[in-house]
Amino acid sequence: MLIDHAVIQVQGGDGGNGCVSFRREKFVPRGGPDGGDGGDGGDVVLIADPGLSTLLDYQYQQRYRAERGQHGQGKKRTGASGADAELRVPPGTVVKDADTGRQLGELLKPGDRLVVARGGRGGRGNASFATATRRAPREAEPGTPGVERRIELELKLIADVGLVGQPNAGKSTLLAALSAARPKIAAYPFTTLEPNLGVVQLSEGRTMVLADIPGIIEGAHEGKGLGLQFLRHIERTRTLAYLIPVDTGDPQAEYELLRSELAEYSRQLAEKPHCVAISKADLLSGEEAPPRVAAPMAFASYVLSGVARTGLQEFAEGLWSVVRRERQVEDESGSSER
């Protein structure tokens, strides 16, 4: 089961208290203050782990706290700093403050780290307060508390291509035909209850990742059907493929509905490069022409069948050309920022 949302409570470790101490040694009268500082509290850190694909662990445990810093000691010994609490999440996780909605960051690549709750600072011992005119201070600072907050974790799958269509448009069948993925396929609405990913292997070592998104119906952006729950998973895709089955009543209206639902959810999502794929071509009779869809903004239109495996190579190569171009643009923009 894909668990792609969780809210958890995190708290950095408290800082240790400073120490009030005076040096006491034989033959060393009035040795002076030697209280050490407290140690800093540990941070709560999120780490992107490629071995994870869901946020399931955070459904069972919702509170996490880093270790507190140790108190300072005599002989100017500083307390040990507290250990960080390292929480592992799948790449593609967006982190928000659950109370304000402010985005704290996102973890996209394996190994990315994000501190979500800083530990408290250790307090100073009395040795830090000694001056030329104040040689025997009897004060020390308490450690400061660690930051505590509620954070919202939201997983957005990282894929190159998003397959968009109404229920029974043939998305799962197409994904299975193009990749090694084995999504559930059946002739009833909402066979796909969670996004499926598949890796498409082309010649010369070229690969791209396809995401099969649960069917989008009218009103999906308002929460109808399953669309709203999973539309977030195509926000990171580089290109989209709108699947229009040949047996639909009005292909043009269906295409415009899909475009409208994505635009209502996210204007940026609707502006991504896209193509139109007339699916289930195996249902056409020998001389029957496939339906035509006017899509002036699309970079291409394809007629294909996942069952008969026709038109798949041309479709995959067309998607790859756009994916490769978008990757190059991202690499160039990343280089210029650095």
Image: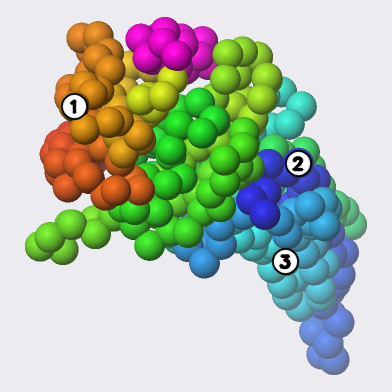
Q: Residue furthest bottom?
A: 26
What type is the residue that disc 2 sits on? Answer: Val
Mark whose residue sits in front, 2 or 1: 1
Can residue 258 be seen here? The reply is: yes
Q: CA distance from mark 2 to mark 3?
A: 24 Å
Q: Position of residue 170 (x, y in %)?
A: 43, 38
Query: Residue at image x 21%, y 32%?
Result: 286
Identify the image quadrant of the C terminus: top left
- Give the Cα distance between marks 1 and 3: 74 Å
- Badge 3 marks a residue whose secondary structure is loop
Q: Quadrant of residue 315?
A: top left
User: Which mark identifies residue 7?
Assistant: 2
Q: Quadrant of the N terminus?
A: bottom right
Q: Nearer the viewer, residue 225 or 320?
A: 225
Q: Quadrant of residue 252?
A: top left
Which label number is shown at residue 287? Answer: 1
In the rendered image, is residue 116 in sight?
A: no
Find residue 114 and name its label.
none
Q: What residue did someone put label 3 on?
A: 82
Q: How is the image coloured?
A: rainbow
Relative to 220, 92 lies left or right: left
Examine the rendered structure and indicate whether residue 122 appears above or below residue 30. Answer: above
Taking 157 as reference, is 89 above or below it?
A: below
Magenta-colored segment: predominant secondary structure: helix
Q: Secondary structure at mark 1?
A: loop
Q: Which residues are magenta?
A: 249-267
Q: Earlier in the sequence, mark 2 or mark 3?
A: 2
Looking at the image, which residue is at 44% across and 20% down? 248
Q: For the residue labelled by badge 2, is the local secondary structure a helix, a strand or a loop?
A: strand
The amino acid at mark 3 is Gly
